């Protein structure tokens, strides 16, 4: 059997090398299009606050017990009204202080004693929704809570 130069084909090894090179290039391209895995500090903090507010509402519905949320520059926590006044919330995830990052500026809409109170029927003590604005550099997010619904919007940044 004679080999002619015009009939030369591709060997299996050459084919595998080309496939490996194409696979490496495709992987590099796919890695460059990765979605953003984490948000800005204000966005993450706002989402955590909204989740905690929703948990507090669910607890109030399940246990027929009102609550209050208290926030300041150091962080936020949840409270319930007991015989002696405000006391830490009964739910273990809501009772501890949740700190805000040190690099973030926080402005909280004032309510009596910085506590936004909601009755066991989910009726807020005041007529104004509770608002917290979280800022870091150009990024700002505002959390609004009316006693039932917690939501956040981006108010600055990209």
Image (cartoon, rainbow, N blue to C red):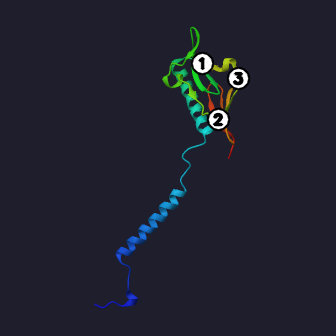
**Quick one: label 3 or label 2, which is nearer the N terminus?**
2
**Quick one: label 1 or label 3, which is nearer the N terminus?**
3
Within-10-Å neighbours for mark 2: few <14, some 14–19, many 20+: some
| Residue 129, horizontal then vertical, whole percent | 69, 26
The span from disc 1 to disc 2 (Cα, nearest Å) is 34 Å
Quick one: SS at disc 1?
A: loop
Quarter of the view holding residue 20: bottom left
Quick one: SS at disc 2?
A: loop
| Residue 147, horizontal then vertical, whole percent | 63, 24
- Of circles 1 and 3, which is in front? 3
Quarter of the view holding residue 5: bottom left
Q: Residue furthest left?
A: 1
Q: Are marks 3 and 2 in contact (CB under 8 Å)?
A: no
Q: Residue at x 64, y 35 (%)?
A: 104
Q: Are marks 1 and 2 in contact (CB under 8 Å)?
A: no
Q: Is residue 20 above or below residue 74?
A: below
Quick one: SS at disc 3?
A: loop
Q: Is residue 143 above or below residue 138?
A: above
| Residue 79, horizontal then vertical, whole percent | 57, 19
- Of circles 1 and 2, which is in front? 2
Q: Nearer the viewer, residue 58 or 74?
A: 74
Task: Return the residue at label 1.
Answer: 121
Within-10-Å neighbours for mark 1: few <14, some 14–19, many 20+: some
Task: Return the residue at label 3.
Answer: 110
| Residue 7, horizontal then vertical, whole percent | 38, 87
Q: Residue at x 68, y 41 (%)?
A: 137
Task: Return the residue at label 2.
Answer: 104
The span from disc 1 to disc 3 (Cα, nearest Å) is 22 Å
Q: Nearer the viewer, residue 95 or 137?
A: 137
- Of circles 3 and 2, which is in front? 2
**Quick one: label 1 or label 2, which is nearer the N terminus?**
2
């Amino acid at each position: 059997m004679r080999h002619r130069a015009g009939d030369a084909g591709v060997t299996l090894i050459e084919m595998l090398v080309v496939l490996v090179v194409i696979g490496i290039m495709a992987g590099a391209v796919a890695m460059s299009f990765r979605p953003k895995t984490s948000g800005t500090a204000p966005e993450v903090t706002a989402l955590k606050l909204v989740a905690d507010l929703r948990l507090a509402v669910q607890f109030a519905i399940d246990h027929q017990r009102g609550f209050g949320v208290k926030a300041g520059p150091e962080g936020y926590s949840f409270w319930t009204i007991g015989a002696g006044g405000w006391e830490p919330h009964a739910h273990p995830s809501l009772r501890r202080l949740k700190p805000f990052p040190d690099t973030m500026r926080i402005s909280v809409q004032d309510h009596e004693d910085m506590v936004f109170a909601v009755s066991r029927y989910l009726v807020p003590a005041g007529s104004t929704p509770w608002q917290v604005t979280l800022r870091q550099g150009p990024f700002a997010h505002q959390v609004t809570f009316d006693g039932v619904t917690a939501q956040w919007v981006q108010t600055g940044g990209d």
